Every structure is written in structure tokens, then in C-alpha cells.
Amino acid sequence: MSLRKQKNSPEPIRIGIDTGGTFTDFVVASGSRLTAFKAASTPRNPAEAILSGITRILADAETIGFEIVHGTTVATNALLERRGARTALITTEGFEDVIEIGRQARPDLFNLMVTRREPLVPRELRFGASERTGPDGSIVEVLDEESLENMVRLISNHQPPVESVAVCLLFSFANPAHEQVIARALEPIGLPVSLSHKILPEYREYERTSTVVINAYLVPMMSRYLSALAEGLESVVRGPSSAAKSRTKNHGPRTTDYGLRVMQSNGGSVSAATAAAEPVRAILSGPAGGVVGALRVCAAAGIRDIITFDMGGTSTDVALCRGEARTTNEALVAGLPVAVPVIDIHTVGAGGGSIARVDAAGALRVGPESAGADPGPACYGRGNEVTVTDANLVLGRFGGASLLGGEMPIDAGRSRSVLTRLAGEMSRFAERPVTPERAALGVIRVANANMEAALRVVSVERGQDPRLFTLVGFGGAGGLHVCELAAALRVPRIIVPRSPGTLSALGVLLGDVVKDYSRTVMKKTSGLDARVLERDFVALEQEAVRDLKYEGFGTDKMKLRRSVAIRYVGQSFEIDIAWGGRIEAKFHAAHRGRYGYGDSSRPIEIVSLRVRATGVTQKPRAKRWPSGQSRIASHSHTARVYLSERSAQVPVYARDDLSVGVRLTGPAIITEYSSTTLIPPRFKVEVDSWLNLIIRGQRSEVRGQKSDIRRDQTSEV
């Protein structure tokens, strides 16, 4: 979908941006009009691609203002690549090594030679404060101010210099007084300080320490990035001179007259200033936008239970949702626990840019390494490695000679050259020579196997039957693989939204402002006085309302939802249950649904209280399209495509030409600006009232029966 001019717009425009490893996606909303485009990402400085896109948007728009909501991978990449700040940790004396000891669970159960990654904070920068707070919040040992002064001095004089400080004291969630004293003592040295009672006021010292350390580790980089982005936006909007005049020296971006928000991992956004102070909440920023977008699109189409399949340039993200996104406090990112709420997304290193290679034993491997945006797949003209994109191109599955509606020409000869090289490497281990097409099919099959395994993790391995769900395929590469994955999992229905390659950017735009609050209470439900919990709930809600007002929301735009983290006494982990009547019965039912059993005779305890505060944002109005005059689609041309080891002439359709009610049967290729969708034989497609592609496979296809393409139309590889 190309960017259309927005002349004389009566409303402020809203811009959703999702920064991926290969492309940066933009969705522009003006009233009911949605436009989208993609630009090559700039991994060394993600802000460059964003500012270039904003310049393009403003050049085509006359508006009274605009708001940007940004899904970013800056925090994720910094953590994965260990490029964060030099961080110091102050904790209770005797607990300095908690982040290194961790839990008894081995990262690889059967690997006797397994080694753990080094903690983010080295031993010489972990300091123990002489103090102790009890589990009930009582002060067992008063904080020793002399030892505190010594720690502050050591941090201030350390070489190389410390850039950020994490503070996580034992039981500070019950009484934060000592953490507050330490924060005041650190103020003179001018470093950003992350306090555990603000980031995660819950018990489990390892997870809490890990989360606050990650936050401190990311604050300087995220703050610099958002400040630079805000300064760049100032230059784009008003010219370079105004940006220089309005620079600030604080750790977050300054306030401007346009909005800049950042997507969080929980599916909601916050102001850039909040994101700069709490970047741990934005680690899965972009993938969360994809889940939000998929849920909104499917809700409009009357589809509730979905499995999202987001295949981009560097990775594939999948999630299972029953009407809403499931959040978890047990996420692992780069092998480290992140205990703030995140959408339960499983990620694998399989994308369009994933690199294929033959290992020493002759096995074909695909990913997790990616060609990214620079140099990118070979067909982009700079790369020399075989990628999944190159394999699809050699197999003819793009149905044309360019991408992004002709904006990006592709070099088919270069793709064939690198596939020929890979085929030669494979031939050394094969009984007969491998052709480039057979090598490409092998790349696709291995990539599909990796993605199928990811889909099984969020469905079959959790006791969920994928046949009861709809598979939502999106991302720039998702449409080329979604049907084969649905067949492998026997999913009966697929939905490919309009402009699937930019759905994550749309989801970023559709997300409300969401903030999560929690407090550990440890109360058994038997004989519980609900008034005790009411006081704690009210305190959390007052904090939530205060923060949402700071974000610019009136009380009429606020929603507050209470829940409790609850478990059987003696269990290690909890289930979130909406607060209200019959809480014990709800818990037993939820426990049966998740684990297959419930025991009404066992005592239950409420571990933590939680409040989710939502600031309802303005959203683009969805448009329902009328039925077209014809339900028969006409293709623009045909392309020779390898759907198996035989090629066939396959009709190619332009998605913009497919009106509501159109039906067609595979094999077919459907092209559009942001993506390409491959319809294998025996799959049927219908365009619904929201211009989604609704794809259904026949049972014979699921069982692996042969294609019905006539032999006289095919040729062998």
C-alpha cells in the first residue's frame, strides 16, 4: 500500500513505526484513511530510517499536529549483543551473587559441559549494603550510612567509569525506605538509578534483581537513542536551529508539542520519557505490536481464538491468543529472566534474511544468523549468503521481478548464483547432484521446520489443539510460508490481513497506553478479610491514575483492571485471575485448564495484587467494504513456480484487484506492496468484508496428498 497524500487533513495524523532488522515499517492514520510504506532499516543508527520516513510523510501532509508511536528493537538488541551500560549493583549484604547463582535449573539439561553466560554486572561492581528489612516490612537492621558513603565513593571513582546503578534490597517491596535512602545518596554523582521497588515490587529476589539490573543496563542507551530521535524529529519539523536551541541535559527526551510514545512488551505504549527510564518494559516492543494488530483485525472479522505467525526479515514471532493476548511474568530474554509483564511470545531465528549453510556433517542449516538490512539477502544486490528470501526467489514464488510495488528491484541472477554455490556444497554429501532449485526447496523445508517447531511450542506443547484456532500470517515473509505451516499443524483456517507486512506498525498504532502495577501480599484465601486487600488495591489504583494523568489522560479515558496472582500453598508459580467473586472457584477452573487438574481441598494463597491501568487512545476507524460486482478474480499474469520438485505455470493476482467476495483456488500467488502470499494447490481463498484473505485447506491437503497440477504443465527440477 503506497503512501497517499494527506492534503488538508482535518485531524492530527498518527504514525505507527515498527523498526525491524531488515525493514522499518510506517503506518499513517488520518481519520479513517490508513496508508503504509516500508523503508530499509539502518541497524547502526535506527533513528536514521525513522527520520527519513517521517520526512517523507510530512512532505506529503499538511496537518495541525502528529503523534508517533514507536516499536523499537534498541533495548532488545543491546541486551542480546551485550552492548549496554557499565552497571553497578547495590543489594543487601550477603546477596551480591544472587544474579550469578540464579536458579538450580540448568539451561541445557543433558549438556555436562554447559556454561552460563557472564552476569551483566561483574563481581567487582556488586556491593552489599549493611541493612536488612524483614518480609513484613519491619526494619531488622538499620542501613549503615558509613558503609553507604563508602559504596557511593567506590562507584563514583571506579575506572572505567560506572554509567548506571541498580538497587535491589531484600524485601524492599514490603518497605522501600532503605532503597529510597540509597537513591538520595547516589544523587550527587549524577548517574541514572533503577530501584527495584519501582520497577518490580514483588518477591523472588533472583527475578527481581535480574529485572532491575537489565533496566539499569539499558537506561543510558535507550535514553540516548530516544533523546537523539526527539532531537532529530525537532529538526525535521522545525529545522536544525530549533533542535540545537532545545537540547536538554537530562537522561530522557525533552517534551515537544508533538507526541512520541514507545510500545511496551505488554501490548501498550507509554511516553518516551517513561520508556527511557524503564526500558526493560520495551524489550519485546515490536513483536507485541504484531500481536495487538492481529487481535484487532481478527476481532473485526469475528475471529476470536488465533495463533499469530509474524515472519519478518530476521526472526519469526508466534503467540497463541484466546480472545486477548496472554501476558506472562516468566519471560526469558537472552537467557535472563524478565519478570515484568510481557505478551507471551515465542521467537525463533527464522526470517526472510536467515542464512542457509551446510555444516561439517553435511546437514543443511537455516538461521539463526541473518543477513539483516546490511548487506541483506543476495537478491538485494549486496549480500553473498544464501537466505530464505533468495530461496523463494529462485523458486519463482514472488511472481515478479521486484518488491515493494516496484520500489525495490531484485537481482534474480545473484540469488541463483549463491544457490548454485550452496547446491554444490550439498552435492558433496548427496547421492546425486543437487540443482539450485532442489537446494532452494531444502532451505524452505528447513526454515518451515524451525517455524513449525515454534508454533508447536505455543500450542501442542501447552495442551492446546491448533485445529481449534485460526492461523494469522503476517510480516513481510509470512504469506509465503503460512499455508504450508497450517497444513503441517492441520489448522483449518488462515487469515492474511490487508497489508500484512506492516501489521506490526498498525498494532503499535492501535495499542492503548498500558501500565502495570503490582504488590506482593502473601495472603491465604481462607478467612481472608477482603478489606485488607482493598486498601492495597486502592493504593495501586491511585498510583495508576496519577501516572495516567501525567501521560495526558482524563478519568473518562482510563480503565483499571484488578487481578491477583494466586496458587496452591507450596507451589512455586502463580496464575493470574481477575479479582472478584468466587475467586477460589475461578482459580481451580483455571488450574484445570492449564495443568489438567484442580484440587479444591488444597489451601490457596494470594501471592500478589496486580492492577492494569489503560489509557484509551484515539484509533483509526476500521472500514468495512461493500461486495464487488464480480466474485471471480482475473490474474494479471502467470509465473513459473516450483511448489515441489516440479514447476508449474501459476496465476499471479494483484491483491488490490481482489474485491470483497472474490474466491479463487490454488495454486496462486497474490502480490501486494508489503508482502506476497503463496496459495498452494487445493487451498481456497475468499476475500472478506475487511479485505482479509480467508484461506482454507482441504483435509486431503492436510494429509499430504499429491498436488492436482496436471503433468503436462510441469517440468522436473
Image (spheres, rainbow, N blue to C red):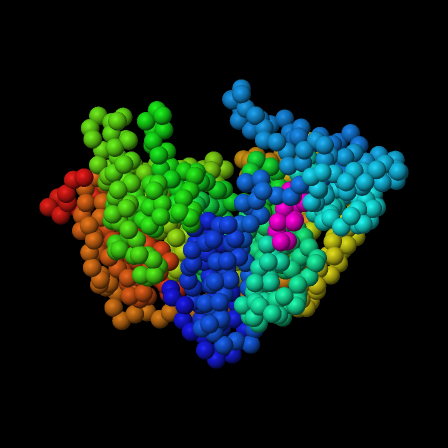
Number of marks in the rendered image:
0
Regarding residue 128, the answer to whether it shows in the image is yes
Percent position of residue 284, x then y: 55, 48
Regarding residue 704, the answer to whether it shows in the image is no
Percent position of residue 267, x then y: 56, 53
| Residue with the most extreme top position | 112
- Magenta: main secondary structure equals helix
In this rendering, position of residue 487 left or right of residue 202: left
Q: Nearer the viewer, residue 139 or 579?
A: 139
Which span of residues is magenta-colored? 211-224
Percent position of residue 356, x then y: 35, 37
Instruction: Give me the residue at 70% from left, 31% from top.
Output: 123
Instruction: Give me the residue at 54% from left, 40% from top.
Output: 81
Q: Quadrant for the N terminus, please.
A: bottom left
Q: Quadrant for the C terminus, please.
A: top left
Instruction: Give me the residue at 26% from left, 27% from top.
Output: 428
Instruction: Give me the residue at 66% from left, 68% from top.
Output: 245
Compared with residue 164, is residue 109 higher up or lower down, i.e. above or below?
Answer: above
Q: Nearer the viewer, residue 288 or 299?
A: 288
Percent position of residue 188, x then y: 81, 50
In this rendering, position of residue 244 left or right of residue 488: right
Q: Nearer the viewer, residue 653 or 182?
A: 182
Compared with residue 225, is residue 552 higher up or lower down, i.e. above or below?
Answer: below
Compared with residue 335, is residue 344 higher up or lower down, i.e. above or below?
Answer: below
Compared with residue 281, is residue 54 higher up or lower down, i.e. above or below?
Answer: below
Q: Is residue 221 magenta?
A: yes
Q: Is residue 171 magenta?
A: no
